[in-house]
């Protein structure tokens, strides 16, 4: 065991230490920086449409219900048409029920969308004032 430890120490002593600074290149200027000219145009004013968050939430929920009920309605409608004459009754009633739910949810989505547009307000902000100029970018 002592031989292995002393052998490792001999090998470590033989390894030459290399400084990382010897391999660094001197810094140079970016050759592309002077060739690029970037222009940013800022609008004179920014318009923000503010909406009532509770109406927006209701609108999203009713939109989700309309989407899910549309899928259910089409699924049961296909099942109704593919069922045999003796098995069509349960599919018929379920298709009608989900179809009515779909119609109600589409109407409620339209009502919530109308309320959302009615209760929204528009805010205009000026965006042309320069707060700080810095040429050394």
Image (cartoon, rainbow, N blue to C red):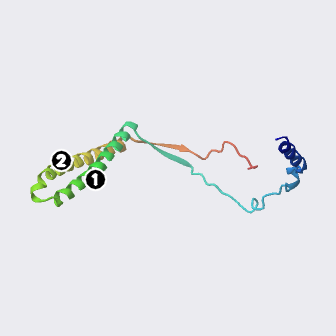
Please identify the quadrant where the N terminus is shown. top right
Instruction: Identify the residue at image location x=86%, y=46%.
Output: 7
Classify 10 Å Cα crowding around label 2: few (below 14), some (14-19), many (20 and above): few
Which residue corresponds to mark 2? 97
Classify 10 Å Cα crowding around label 1: few (below 14), some (14-19), many (20 and above): few
> Of helix, strand and loop, which one carries label 2?
helix
Q: Is residue 64 above or below residue 84?
A: above
Which residue corresponds to mark 1? 71
Position of 80 with respect to 28 (left or right) is left
Q: Are marks 2 and 1 in contact (CB under 8 Å)?
A: no
Position of 87 with respect to 5 (left or right) is left
Instruction: Identify the residue at image location x=30%, y=49%.
Output: 68
Q: Where residue 39 sits in the image (x, y, percent)?
A: 66, 57
Q: Where residue 19 sits in the image (x, y, percent)?
A: 88, 50
Instruction: Identify the residue at image location x=84%, y=46%.
Output: 8
N-terminal of the pair, mark 2 or mark 1, is: 1
When asked about the image quadrant of residue 24, the answer is bottom right
Along the line of sight, the residue nearer the viewer: 73 or 113: 73
Along the line of sight, the residue nearer the viewer: 108 or 23: 23
Along the line of sight, the residue nearer the viewer: 66 or 50: 66
Q: Where residue 55 sits in the image (x, y, percent)?
A: 35, 39
Instruction: Identify the residue at image location x=30%, y=45%.
Output: 65
Position of 62 with respect to 130 (left or right) is left
Total numbered labels: 2
Give the label on residue 105, or none.
none
Residue closest to the far left: 86
Q: Is residue 110 above or below residue 79?
A: above
Q: Where residue 44 sits in the image (x, y, percent)?
A: 57, 49
> Of helix, strand and loop, which one carries label 1?
helix
């Amino acid at each position: 065991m002592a031989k292995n430890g002393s052998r490792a120490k001999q090998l470590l002593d033989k390894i030459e230490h290399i400084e990382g600074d010897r391999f660094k290149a001197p810094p140079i200027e970016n050759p592309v920086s002077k060739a690029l000219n970037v222009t940013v145009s800022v609008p004179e004013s920014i318009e923000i449409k503010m909406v009532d968050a509770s109406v927006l939430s209701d609108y999203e929920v009713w939109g989700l219900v309309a989407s899910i009920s549309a899928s259910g309605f089409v699924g049961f409608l296909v099942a109704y048409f593919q069922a045999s004459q003796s098995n069509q009754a349960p599919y018929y009633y379920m298709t009608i029920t989900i179809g009515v739910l779909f119609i109600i949810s589409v109407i409620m989505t339209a009502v919530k969308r109308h309320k959302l547009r009615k209760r929204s307000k528009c805010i205009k902000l000026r965006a042309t004032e320069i707060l700080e100029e810095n040429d050394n970018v």
